Image (cartoon, rainbow, N blue to C red):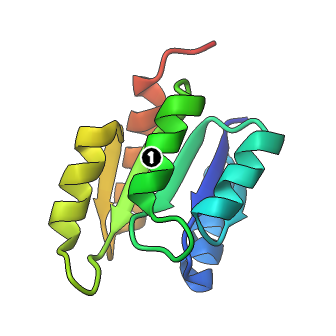
Amino acid sequence: MKRILIVDDEGGIRRATASFLRRVGYEALVAADGKQAVDRLRSESVDLVLCDMCMPEMDGIELILMVRSEWPGVALVAMSGGGRFVSGELLLDSARELGAHATLAKPFGLDELEAAVKGALGAVAPD
């Protein structure tokens, strides 16, 4: 079973996303920000990181850079509805340039989520 780490500072999004991904056959782990995500990545093996771009402590850009550097075999999906001073589109474009395999503009549908996760997992070569 593929393990997905969901990283978002909004608890409702973490819970709903984790619940859906479990229903469609994935193991879902959660973290409230990039720092918590890094702690989990250092202690647990995951196949994919699904991360919000606007978070306190460590944002999505910093997390993507760290994942690409330290865990290059982990698939990445970035999600964003935009921030206070920047559009979601700009953040997601940046995420793609930094190595995200797929992006999701918030709000997104469950079909879009499932397709992005499958596509990103398919883009990463198996061990």
Q: Quadrant of the C terminus?
A: top right
Residue 34 horizontal/vertical position (percent): 58, 61
The residue where tag 1 is placed is 64
Q: Is 94 positioned to the left or the right of 115 in the image?
A: left
Count all numbered tags in the image, as a single digit.
1
Q: Nearer the viewer, residue 89 or 38?
A: 38
Q: Nearer the viewer, residue 109 or 96?
A: 96
For the residue labelled by badge 1, is the local secondary structure a helix, a strand or a loop? helix
Residue 43 horizontal/vertical position (percent): 83, 43
Q: Is residue 33 above or below residue 5?
A: below
Q: Quadrant location of residue 112?
A: bottom left
Q: Quadrant of the N terminus?
A: top right
Q: Is 56 positioned to the left or the right of 21 in the image?
A: left
Identified at 48% across, 74% down, the residue is 55
Identified at 26% across, 76% down, the residue is 82
Q: Is 43 positioned to the left or the right of 121 in the image?
A: right
Q: Is residue 109 above or below residue 48?
A: below
Residue 125 horizontal/vertical position (percent): 49, 15
Q: Is residue 3 above or below residue 88?
A: above
Amino acid residing under circle 1: Ile
Residue 95 shows up from this direction: yes
Residue at the limit of the structure toward the right, as seen here: 43
Identified at 44% across, 26% down, the residue is 122
- Label 1 Cα neighbours within 10 Å, binned few <14 / some 14-19 / many ≥20: many
Q: Quadrant location of residue 19?
A: bottom right
Residue 96 horizontal/vertical position (percent): 26, 43
Q: Is residue 107 above or below residue 23?
A: below
Residue 23 shows up from this direction: no
